[in-house]
Amino acid sequence: MPDQQTIEPFGIYIHWPFCESLCPYCDFNTYCSNQIDHEQWCEAYLRQLDHSAKELTVSQCTSVYFGGGTPSLMESRTVGKILDRISLLWGFSGQPEITLEANPTTVEQGRFLCFRSEGVNRLSLGLQALKDSDLKALGRKHGVKEAIKAYETADRVFNNVSLDFMFGRQFQSAESWIGELQEIVELNPNHLSIYQLTIEPNTPFGKRHAANRLEGIPDEDTLADMYLATMEICERNGFKQYEVSNYSKPGHKGKHNLVYWEYHDFLGIGPGAHGRISIDNQYFRTNTILNPESWLDGIFKLGTGENQRELINQKERGSEYLLTSLRLNDGMSIDRFEQISGNKLDRNAISELVQDNWVGITDGQLQVTTNGRMVLNQIISKLLS
Amino acid sequence: MNSKLTTPPNNSHIRNFSIVAHIDHGKSTLADRLMEFTRTVSKRDLKEQMLDSMDIERERGITIKANTVRLEYKAKDQKSYILNLIDTPGHVDFSYEVSRSMKSVEGSLLVVDASQGVEAQTLANVYQALDADHEIVPVLNKIDLPAADSDRVRQQIEEVIGIDADGAIEISAKTGKGVMDVLEAIVHQLPPPEGDLNAPLKALLVDSWYNPFLGVVVLVRIFDGCLAKGDRIKMISSEATYQVDRIGVFKPEMEDTSQLNSGEIGYFTASIKRVSDTIVGDTITHQKQPCKEAIEGMKPSQPVVYCGLYPMEAGEFNALKDAIEKISLNDSSFTSETEASTALGFGFRCGFLGLLHLEVIRERLEREYSLDLIVTAPSVIYHVYLKKGGMVEIYNPVDLPDPTDIDRIEEPRIMATILSPDQFVGEILSLCHARRGIQHELSFVEKRAMIRFDLPLNEVVFDFHDRLKSVSRGYASFDYTILGYSADNLVKLQILVNSEPVDALAIMVHRTNCETRGRLMCEKLKELIPRHLFKIPIQAAIGGKVVARETIAALRKDVTAKCYGGDITRKKKLLEKQKAGKKKMRQFGRVDIPQQAFINALKVNTD
């Protein structure tokens, strides 16, 4: 892959903060609103891009990701104008990955073709479950039949679809998940993101959990069994795991998400979006105004919706690289870690971890084993302490 | 006032008294009212419960140090009186201190909550007052409450305590109703102090505390003679001599006078450096003209409960050391010695008068000195008799000699008095039996039971009081006196975590209980110690014999499912939080044991 050698990946994340309804487990920066001025929003994104381009002049863009919220609720021409502007400001490298997140509802599938014609070449569909009752408990507005139809449409339109699923749902057993997984792999998409349902504190689920009113969440052992089964079944069916929760058919790893994990620069645009950029060999963590109206205000009054940015020091950069790259099956380049952090890795900690079969080293890459991946947080803690 | 004291006083205008009451029965509120009604403190300056000066005292509604106040009261007979109130510690841990305070006054107000009735603690203190030959004035407080039942409580006082309660004064300390009657009763029912002003000085050291500006302040009761500024004095028991710097009375602030005469209560300072140089109960006299006999009944206060106090982080050892030294300055009954534990590093083995004393000191260390502490299981002092002869006192189970060298082990026993509504008697009896108790008495007055049990102190020091409160829904009250030592079949129960003995978790148990206790501790530790990357066996053993075993399964899953752009910062913070949490653990071999586990491992409901 010669172009990967020459072009440093650079991704742009666009956050659309609106949803038709809010899911009780979601803790992203999302809002329900039926008064959205699409013209104004489109203009705001373009102005923010212009503003950012003033300081980020070098890189070519390798991927764009429209996330949210529900970005499939954006007007397709807004998506088109954003992509045109990016192309104008930075240019795209040879084969950019342009992903849009969508809900598998009937309404939305009607618009897939429009997004395709505006330049989106990859669709990420949030199916989440293949059980109607579970979808309802998760607060999803689609049913299984509808979702499968949406997937089929998307597959025809894009021929490059990623599906999102969740395990560790209320009252779910390992056996029933394994059965569901079988159905999932039979759908045969290019890419699968399969997450364990995480109970976040500031969500309705989090509050119910804290009050002991979120029943039937599987215990640690069951969750471990589910995760092991997920890795095995995906592998057996040609979906190669490349990250903790991500699996792909050959050649279909998510390029944009690899930008995060391989620790390259990315721009975060939209209310609540985060970014990580380098300017003159200084590294910054950027964040934006959370509230949509205030973000718009920021842009139209000051030209940017960005908040105070933070300088990332060398040591932090090292630990962030370790933290994200060990999530990948390819692992972390020891050389690059030492170059980024300016520190040697703790060889004693590593040899202990190798001895206990938590990690291995291949061609200068530190990789966690399947055992290690199950308890990755512990491994990272050990390496960072 | 100085001019008044230069002429030989007639003690008929002095009354010295204390207040005996159970926690919450209104002792401090009544003391506040007495100060207010005699205009000792104006209502405006009165903060709630004026005499309890430490935060912890005020919060817990207990008195730890004796406090005193001098009230000036013009009675209905138009004469002026000086009323000296000594507010005594109200808890069994401080019973010796109570006895000295009682000795310094001639009478007591017995305050009983008219809605609650007599409690165990009241009983213990009222007996001390009777021992000190007090005149006792019964006072029924809280008569404004709908649940007040004066007649029943009057009858109870007569039957349980055995004093005449016909003339009991009905009051509400809260509203002030009846408080004037209390003042009149103090004047007319309590005797004035006796004593010979012309005899050599004989004064009782009632209490002492450290004041950062004045050094040690000594609270005294003058029995004979008079004590004046500049006097050279001698403490009979400690044989130390001092020159008096300042002398005065409490109103309740310190107010200097030139002398204190026979019958009076007040303070002096004499450049005394440490509280431990003053022994509560000691007799103070003049160096040149000493009194012939010391006041009887003095004994040094001895700690009965010991535990280890360790800093959460080894680096805080010096801070803990300083804090312990500062607290010791003011509390001579609290002892400490450095100790090293393989599990916990360097710390202190500390001695306390009882469990409340332990709690109070622990809270002060954590609050006033912002220390993070590991507290190990409380232990009593065992007398271990060796086969080759001789006896060693064991303060920490870890120090127990090799079992083959031991002839017998004796442990302290107590006589517990429990008062409770009768419906809980069954539960309380089984609790006491489970704790190796021997029943001595069970009697009923109406619907209240009095239970007396001979119990090993070791079975009481930990959670007996909590259990008692829980089986009686909070109604039972409890008090005890130390009986002495007796032999029993005691063994050291060791806990092994990941095959290594953790010294800080060793306890002494009765042989018949060792399997049950061992099993419960292992089960509890299994809950308390988080899963690790490897499985951890937890064993309870007597000598080399494992009596119980549990296994903490290896951690199976700990991985964040989602981590994208914005999550990276959050995820990093999460890991940092985890790290901070780890600081609250002590690493033992490869196992991290949470700080709380060392004490919570024992909190098991065996009853």
Image (cartoon, coloured by chain):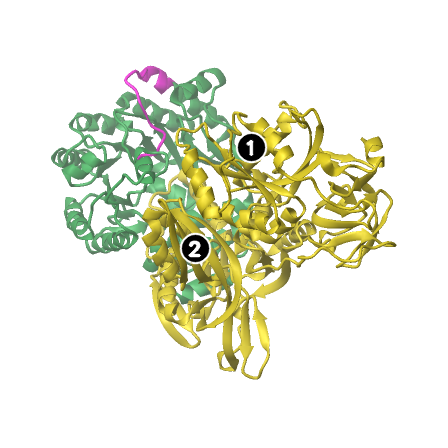
Chain colours: A green, B yellow
- Compare residues B247 and B390 and report the one nearer the observer: B247
Which chain's residue wears label 2? B
Identify the residue at image location x=53%, y=73%: B400
The secondary element bearing badge 2 is classed as: helix
Is residue B118 at all visible to an observer of this figure?
A: no
Q: Earlier in the sequence, mark 2 or mark 1?
A: 1
Whether A133 is drawn above or below B386: the answer is above
Instruction: Residue A301 in the image: state x and y as whole percent.
Output: 48, 15
Give the magenta range.
Answer: A26-43
Q: Quadrant of the N terminus of chain B?
A: top right
Instruction: Residue B520 in the image: state x and y as whole percent.
Output: 36, 62
| Residue occupied by mark 2 | B464
Q: Quadrant of the C terminus of chain B?
A: bottom left
- Compare residues B363 and A285 and report the one nearer the observer: B363
Identify the residue at image location x=61%, y=30%: B184
* Kind of residue at disc 1: Thr
Whether A91 is drawn above or below A375: the answer is above
Instruction: Residue B210 in the image: state x and y as whole percent.
Output: 72, 46
Identify the residue at image location x=77%, y=41%: B213
Which label lies toward us, 2 or 1? 1
CA neighbours of label 2 inside 10 A, class few (<14), some (14 to 19), many (20+) = some
Which chain's residue wears label 1? B
- Compare residues B569 and B507 and report the one nearer the observer: B507
| Residue occupied by mark 1 | B29
CA neighbours of label 1 inside 10 A, class few (<14), some (14 to 19), many (20+) = many
Q: CB of mark 2 within 8 Å of CB of mark 1? A: no
Q: Are marks 2 and 1 on the same chain?
A: yes
* Kind of residue at disc 2: Phe
Residue A318 is inside the magenta segment: no
